[in-house]
Amino acid sequence: MLSENRRSNAHVDWPLIILAFALAIFGVLAISVASFSTTSDSSAPLLNQIVNSTYSMRQTIFLLLAPIVVIVMMVLPSGMLKRRANLFYYISIGMLFVVTLTNGAEGVKAWVDILWDYTIQPSEFAKIFFILMLAKTLAKTDRPMSNRKEFIQIILLLVWPAIAIMSQGEMGTLIVMVFIFAVMLFFGNVSLKLLGTFLAIGIIAIAAIYFFSVASGIDDYRLNRILAFFNPEFYSQNAAYQQSQSKLAIGSGGLHGIGMYVDGAIYQLNYVPADWTDFIFSSIGEAYGFIGCIAITITYMLLILRMLYLAAYTKDRFGQLVIIGVMAMFLYHIFQNIAMTIGLMPITGIPLPFLSYGGSNMISNMACIGIVLNITKNRSLAQSFETPQMSLRGRYFGET
């Protein structure tokens, strides 16, 4: 009892901070390797390599902003995130619909231009506000969705952003939000029978969306990506080219990797398109080898396990669910991104957290870390751990 109370004490969680910033710092280095070109000098010092890379320098700017974002989110008044969840959620929905009016590439309208060729991706931040709103709604009762009113209310929380994101053509983000939704419902004590029904309906709905898109002739490239996943040899020169080259790059790294800034490397010759963004893991595999890939995977695993630990010893129901939602978001991004680079999943345009190039990705991820820190810092010391609260599915996984 004493040990559990100590674990649930309010604190600033330094292990979580160290893991997140270790990944982000390594990300700047990995981006400089991925963007190493045929015009670059392989003998230049490490600092010069980073400075000479436009993408790594921009990522450095985002990294320097990251501590500010974390601190701001961490010091917000206790309870503000819960009180203002509705406002943040509806603003984010409005931003998503505004983005649908912009021009896009490959049928995707996900970015808004701001200044000096910088863009912002509202869907990255919409995921955060979706987590806050869903956590607030689920935290109201011990058994959510037990009546028709709650059922409709919670379903609509997913429906509105889903419509906006589908209008943007950003299916990867939609799948992430569906995964977050399912995980939070599971840990929110929603009936397992109801969750099973949702799973079946979700699979049918996603399949129907794809078939409709293909039949209407507006989504051929996504269909080709799926077909390429099942028959990569046939599509090796078009839809499967990126994934095939990614596997080649990772395989060429061997056990120890070929090293950084190597002339003639696949990452230098740019054989893997977007290897500094969504396919950053292919450059890591080539440069640092199997050992480097395992090190990154273990670091991610520690990050996920740390959040599960923090959720288990957080007494506040809303706080528990927010941490679980953030964990689910990171988990799916990590799994999907790494799996698609090694050919285990079809390609979807979602980044690898903290490592892929992108300001919206970096800032939103660090904001999530700050929110988790805010929750652990504002834990109630007076509340006994044995006070009836959400069980986190029987606190992993004994039923309540």
Image (spheres, helix red, strand yellow):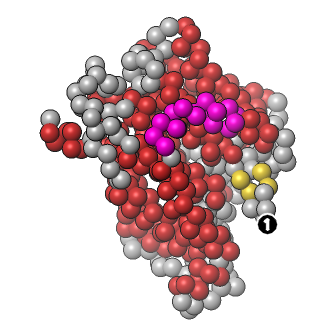
Majority secondary structure of magenta residues: helix
Q: In the image, what residue occupies the spot 58% across and 55% down?
A: 363
Q: Which quadrant would residue 4 be assigned to in this image?
A: top left
Question: In this rendering, does residue 251 appear at all?
Answer: no
Q: Position of residue 332 (x, y in %)?
A: 49, 43
Residue 343 or residue 294, whichever sits in front: 294
Q: Judge whether residue 317 can be spotted in this image.
A: yes
| Residue for badge 1 | 116
Image location of residue 261, percent across then percent down: 55, 81
In this view, which residue lies farthest toward the left?
2
Q: Position of residue 139 (x, y in %)?
A: 44, 24
Residue at (28, 19) in percent of width and height: 400
In the rendered image, residue 233 lying in the magenta stretch gets the answer no
Q: Extreme bottom residue here?
A: 43
- State the image quarter where residue 292 is shown: bottom left
Q: Residue furthest top?
A: 148
Q: Is 224 located above or below residue 351 in the figure? A: above
Quick check: 283 above or below 69? below
Q: Residue at x 65, y 82 (%)?
A: 52
- Say what secondary structure mark 1 lies in: loop
- Residue located at (23% from left, 31% from top): 384
The kind of residue tagged 1 is Trp
Which span of residues is magenta-colored? 77-93
Vertical placement of 158 versus 118: above or below?
A: above
Magenta stretch encompasses residue 80? yes
